[in-house]
Image (cartoon, rainbow, N blue to C red):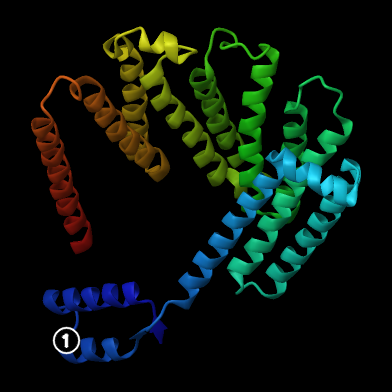
Amino acid sequence: MKVDREKSEFLDEMIEQWEHDGLINEETGARLRKSYEAKNFDWLRLAQYAFWVALACGVIALGSLLIDNTILKYLQSIYNTPNIVIAIISAGIAGWLYILGFKRKQKQSHLKFSNEAIVFAAILLTANAVAYFGKAIDNGSGNFSILILISVIIYGVLGYVFNSRLIWIFALLSLGAWFGTETGYLSRWNYYFLGMNYPLRFVAFGALLTAASFLMKRISKLQQFFQVTYIAGMVYLFVSLWGLSVFGNFASLEEWYAVRQLSLFYWALISAAVCVASTFIGLKYRDDIAREFGITFLFINLYTRYFEYFWDSWHKALFFSVLAASFWLIGRKAEKIWNVEFLK
């Protein structure tokens, strides 16, 4: 059996550990080592990276097309195609790619990356169709959040119908974009909405999305989307909390520059308290997601405060010496924890 080089090294270590603990003898260990062989080249990983690069280039190409008015005018002068026609064509191709991708998923499930690439291309064409549809019906009101809401509905329905977490992720991303643009439009693009700047708004949004994920867990037809929704809600929540701990509830950089960073310490305390609570809940209820988000962002918050409070006041040699020592201690502690878990 051929396995990846990393897996081969892991199996070698495991067999050596079993021999050392007396769980197997040397003859059994030798037979186990002969039962697998390391691949000379990981073609699967190359395929994965190649598809990622291709999709990234596709996103850049589509984004450049949508935002570059010169290119759009040039294409319109050549083809003179109405926006509504482009929207219909994009929607038609997207629909065909959705059907193709999910038929291949059923019949050729082993071609995982190419199937996901086809679905991803359909997602991009869906966004293109919605964008051009918006241009076709634009009346100059500036309320483009309705288009993003349409994207949320389309992605949500398609994700549910095709049972696709990839499409559901884009529904959640579009939902966050809709929330930001809608609150901006309702506040007439002022800095505050109901007294909240953007980081504080998305703290509330992330908390609501996280709570909604646990409601989804109780609905059998939506349980498959619980984890991805839970993670998305936690990302929105903790990234926004970190931003709030840095910028506070200020709306502009001018206001933020006018105050000392130490005056925002209470926001940092709130952010750290949420991280500690998430870690405690994760440990108590064996929730890996809550635990890892709590620990990760607690460290991010601690190091952010370190840079904020000591970067200007300490000599750089002392600053980086303390930083190096802290990372060394973390590494040693993590190594000890890993070794205990490995022996178990």
Residue at (55%, 45%) from the top-left corner? 228
The residue lying toward the viewer, choosing from 71 and 219, is 71
Residue 162: quarter of image: bottom right
- Residue 220 in view, yes or no: no
User: Residue drawn at (22%, 78%), measured in percent from left and top?
Assistant: 15
SS label for mark 1: loop
Q: Nearer the viewer, residue 267 or 227?
A: 267
5 over 335 or under it: above or below = below
Mark 1 Cα within 10 Å, few/some/many (few <14, many 20+)? few
Which quadrant of the rendered structure holds the N terminus?
bottom left
Residue 95: image location, x then y, percent: 82, 56
Total numbered circles? 1
- On screen, residue 339 versus residue 62, left or right, reads left
Taking depth in this image into account, of 68 and 130 the one nearest to the observer is 68
Residue 39 picture quarter: bottom left
Residue at point 69%, 54% (across, down): 163
With 324 as the anchor, is 219 left or right in this view? Answer: right
Residue 232 left/right relative to 288: right
Q: Which residue is mark 1?
A: 25
Instruction: Return the x and y of residue 323 as percentages of the image width and height.
Output: 15, 36
Viewport quadrant of the C terminus: bottom left
- The three-letter code of the residue at mark 1 reads Asn
x and y, in percent, of residue 99 in the image = 79, 62
The location of residue 283, given as percent across then percent down, is 32, 39
Residue at the image point whose x is 43% and y is 77% from the top: 42
Residue 290 seen anywhere in this rendered image of the structure:
yes
